[in-house]
Image (cartoon, grey):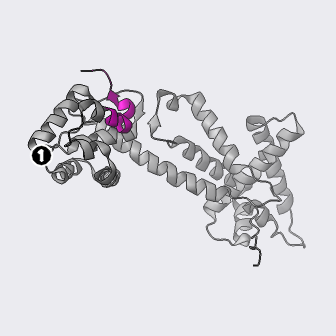
Amino acid sequence: MLPALVVERLPRLVRAIRCFGAGDNGDEPAILADELAGITAMVAEKFTNDRTAEGIQRACFLTVGCVSLGIEHDVQDDDEEAALDYLVEEGAEHAFQVGFRLIRDLAALPEDSLVGEYDNDPVYMQRRMKELFVDICSADPNQNWSGPERYEIQLEQRKAVQAIVRAANWLRRHHYEGPINDADLNAEGVIALAVIFAIEGGGRIVAKTGQKDFERLVSSVRKNKPDYEAGWAELMAKVPAQHQAVLADRIASYREHCTVIQKIRSRASIKTLFAELENYAGSELDADYA
């Protein structure tokens, strides 16, 4: 069996610079080198340690990666001559700024569906951006680099989380007892409650609950035996189009796998069902009897 071929994939900046011909390139190589040196000095001052050789090297790697990320974004195909033309015409600093904005915007997206007050803290946000910058943009000029691929994966993941958080926030604003303004948010928990309570029918949106209201739900479902699908359809009809995909996905999952829904018509005790509900609703469930 032949060994798998390793395809060289150096940072885009390095591949573009290689396109400088052996002949006369005028002042372009020197101008580009001077610009990259200035960017590296700035990165060393702000993100690494400009007093040590290791700090300068790390800053160099970050500069290479961030400029490469900017090139990858603005020069869509693999034409390295086009990448070099872009660098010469627009400048390395422009490419760096494009790459850095991508990282900054990525860091602003939620990483998971548990959102706390600290997530909007400026110090925490700055630290989170720096960690992403280092994780994605650190690129050894002499080694293969997968920064753009890792950026795209993170972007898709965080966009999916953002959609969940936005759907949960909409449900909170339209909670049947009035808007919920808690700083902490368990987005999956909010959506779980909305989907579970929707089986009763009537289109009432529940984004937070306590044991008393849950007992009422169980009693109602056992007595009236509602059509779950009709209840979910009523919920979907109330939710704006931009949030429907998230709700539809959770409904499809809970239809098959939600133990609360599976057991609610059985002889299971309220205590058992409430414990099951905690697994789905988490912090959005008021444990105290209300």
User: Please, what secondary structure does the residue beneath circle 1 have?
Assistant: loop
**Mark 1 neighbour density, 10 Å: few (under 14) some (14–19) many (20 or more):** few
Residue at 26% in and 47% down: 262
In this view, 186 is above or below 236: above
Q: Tell me: 237 left or right of 193.
A: left
Residue at 19% in and 54% down: 229
**Quarter of the image that includes the N terminus:** bottom right
User: Residue type at mark 1?
Assistant: Lys
Which is the main secondary structure of the residues drawn in magenta?
Answer: helix
Query: Is residue 123 rendered magenta in the image?
Result: no
Q: Position of residue 103 (x, y in %)?
A: 61, 47
In this view, 181 is above or below 264: above
Q: Position of residue 195 (x, y in %)?
A: 27, 44
Q: Nearer the viewer, residue 72 or 36?
A: 72
Would you say residue 208 is visible in this rendering?
no
Q: Nearer the viewer, residue 34 or 243?
A: 243
Q: Nearer the viewer, residue 284 or 124?
A: 284
Q: Tell me: 204 left or right of 131.
A: left
**Quarter of the image that includes the C terminus:** top left
Q: Which residue is mark 1?
A: 225
Q: Position of residue 123 (x, y in %)?
A: 60, 28
Query: Is residue 282 rendered magenta in the image?
Result: yes
- Looking at this rendering, what residue extends furthest in the left direction? 224
Would you say residue 81 is visible in this rendering?
yes
Q: Classify residue 221 by image quadrant.
A: top left
Residue at 16% in and 31% down: 216
Magenta extent? 275-290
In this view, 110 is above or below 290: below
